[in-house]
Image: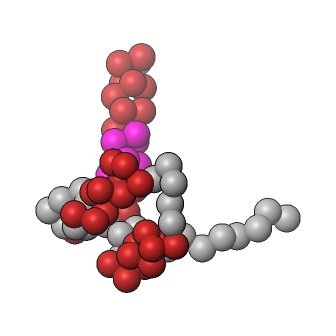
Amino acid sequence: MKKLFLLLLTALFLYGCGAGARESGFWQHDSMYKNWDHLKYSLYGYKSPTADTAKKSQEQGWWGIEIPYIPAE
């Protein structure tokens, strides 16, 4: 019975992870970074972002789908 429960729990966990990965858009492109500017920012520039990096990220679409903010009640 324990093995069946663990198997079911593992299957649900993997299903949830797959659904999250599908929604994220990660698998829709062949690299982790959008371009070289995005890679440089992720490696070196994230500690001190500038207005220029914010402008580049918007223009080049570095961050995927937007998640809307829903305030807690």
Q: What stretch is highlighted in magenta?
A: 12-19
Residues 16 and 43: in front is 43
Looking at the picture, how far across and down is residue 31, in whole percent? 18, 59
Using the image, determine if residue 9 lies above or below residue 14: above
Q: In the picture provided, is 30 more to the left or to the right than 38?
A: left
Relative image position of residue 27 (x, y in whole percent): 23, 61
Q: Quadrant of the N terminus?
A: top left
State whether residue 16 is above or below residue 58.
above
Going by the image, does 31 lie left or right of 15? left
Quarter the C terminus occupies: bottom right
Query: Is 33 left, or right, of 57 in this rendering?
Result: left
Q: Which residue is drawn at 27% across and 57% down?
A: 39
Numbered-mark total: 0
Task: Give the prevailing secondary structure in the magenta stretch.
Answer: helix
Q: x, y percentage for residue 8?
A: 38, 34
Q: Along the line of sight, which residue is nearer the eye, 24 or 64?
A: 64
